[in-house]
């Protein structure tokens, strides 16, 4: 999974990334995109590792792109922001980080701390970036559609769609709400529009303000929002688990924000995990909700999909309640599922296949 952190300069993106990854933050004021791979914590993997004692445990990972702070205050800033936005078009989702923390030594974007305004500005700029591309595309297609070339039928379809997208954007509506079917999706997929991707918001608040509701003025009504203090969370991430627990108790925090952050990413993308176990490896595999057993097999290896026979499946909950695989089988809770079976979160699957 690939995601990008976007926000105005000094909103706390690099600090947040350090909180999630446990690594020290990249230098502030970096000019280029910086990528960090973050492991996805999963208590189930810890428990399964105890039970199976595998040679290795493989957590899912998220590739986070830490994008330098955006600024739309002048032409230079806008050009630079446009360039950066163009570089991250292929990520699966965007996390919009907005500043709500007070810190006199950190200059605020537009000279004031205003998370609702910054969120709105980010969303508007993403719409405008897409609009620019749509306009260019429409010009090109309008010149092209009357030529009797091989792609003429497709060009006509795309032009019609691009005009519809243009209307939507001019009415402040993201593209993701306009695309109705796979055919339309196929026509525009290569363009990687920004507003096609789902969004999540992180409101970076001052210490102690994590549960005080911050008004985003409806700017985030269609997305997951999490509130945290990136600075505190980054400090927490540097501690050993015991001191971290103590510190969190003092602060009145129940769990590290990194967990909430990753859960929100999974929810935003509609992802769940199935698990595989064995002497060699215990591993979590992220898949989209609704994935069939056959497609889940393909995530592991194309051979397993090709030679698919059955998915021997038990639920993680049954395994923890009954203690081990033998007991799960004895209780009749080991199932043999076929290709069409819809994989559930926490399914532990052993694919039987033959190639
Ligand atoms: N008080 C406070 N300062 C923060 C917080 N998050 C970030 N900062 C400070 O704000 C500055 C910019 O943070 P940084 O993560 O580099 O922002 P970026 O430009 O969005 O990557 C740094 O000096 C941070 O220490 C926070 O939650 N509270
Ligand atoms: Mg940064």
Image (cartoon, grey):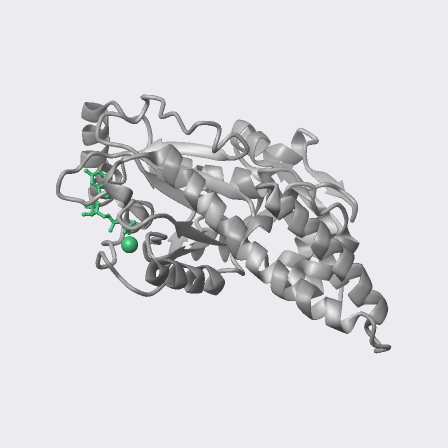
In the image, residue 306 sits, relative to residue 251, either above or below, namely below
At a point 70% along the width and 65% down the height, the residue shown is 303
In the image, residue 120 sits, relative to residue 194, either above or below, namely above
At a point 71% along the width and 54% down the height, the residue shown is 163
At a point 35% along the width and 35% down the height, the residue shown is 115
Residue 109 shows in the view: yes
Q: Is residue 18 shown left or right of residue 294?
A: left
- Give the x, y percent position of residue 20: 33, 46
- Give the x, y percent position of residue 25: 24, 54
As rendered, which of 277 and 202 lies closer to the eye?
202
As rendered, which of 352 and 92 lies closer to the eye?
92
Q: Is residue 252 shown left or right of residue 264?
A: left
Farthest residue to the left: give it.
105
At a point 18% along the width and 35% down the height, the residue shown is 243
In the image, residue 69 sits, relative to residue 260, either above or below, namely below
Q: Is residue 351 shown left or right of residue 202?
A: right
Quadrant location, the C terminus: bottom right
Q: Which quadrant of the picture is home to ligand 1?
A: top left
Q: Quadrant of residue 313?
A: top right
In the image, residue 326 sits, relative to residue 63, either above or below, namely above
- Give the x, y percent position of residue 204: 31, 37
Q: Is residue 197 shown left or right of residue 137?
A: left
Q: Quadrant of residue 135?
A: bottom right
As rendered, which of 185 and 138 lies closer to the eye?
138
- Give the x, y percent position of residue 329: 66, 36
């Amino acid at each position: 999974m690939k995601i990008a952190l976007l926000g105005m300069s000094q909103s706390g993106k690099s600090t947040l990334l350090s909180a999630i990854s446990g690594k020290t933050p990249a230098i502030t004021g970096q000019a280029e995109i910086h990528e960090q791979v973050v492991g996805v914590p999963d208590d189930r993997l810890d428990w399964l590792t105890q039970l199976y004692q595998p040679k290795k445990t493989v957590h899912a990972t998220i590739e986070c792109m830490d994008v330098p702070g955006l600024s739309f205050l002048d032409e230079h800033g806008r050009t630079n922001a446009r360039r950066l936005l163009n570089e991250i078009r292929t990520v699966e989702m965007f996390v919009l980080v907005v500043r709500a923390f007070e810190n006199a030594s950190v200059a605020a974007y537009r000279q004031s701390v205003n998370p609702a305004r910054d969120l709105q500005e980010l969303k508007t700029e993403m719409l405008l970036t897409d609009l620019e591309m749509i306009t260019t595309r429409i010009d090109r297609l309008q010149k092209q559609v009357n030529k009797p070339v091989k792609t003429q039928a497709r060009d006509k379809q795309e032009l019609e769609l691009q005009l519809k997208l243009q209307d939507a954007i001019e009415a402040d509506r993201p593209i993701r709400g306009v695309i109705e079917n796979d055919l339309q999706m196929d026509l525009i997929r290569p363009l990687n529009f920004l507003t096609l991707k789902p969004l999540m918001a992180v409101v970076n608040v001052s210490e102690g303000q994590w549960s005080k509701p911050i008004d985003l003025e409806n700017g985030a009504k269609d997305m997951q929002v999490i509130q945290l203090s990136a600075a505190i969370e980054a400090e927490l991430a540097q501690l050993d688990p015991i001191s971290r627990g103590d510190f969190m108790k003092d602060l009145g925090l129940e769990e590290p924000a990194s967990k909430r952050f990753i859960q929100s990413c999974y929810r935003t993308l509609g992802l769940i995990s199935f698990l595989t176990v064995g002497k060699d490896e215990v591993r979590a595999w992220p898949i989209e909700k609704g994935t069939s057993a056959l497609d889940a097999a393909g995530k592991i290896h194309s051979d397993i999909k090709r030679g698919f026979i059955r998915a021997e499946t038990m639920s993680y909950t049954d395994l923890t309640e009954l203690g081990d695989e033998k007991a799960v089988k004895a209780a009749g809770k080991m199932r043999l599922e076929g290709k069409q079976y819809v994989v559930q979160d926490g399914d532990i699957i052993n694919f039987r296949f033959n190639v």
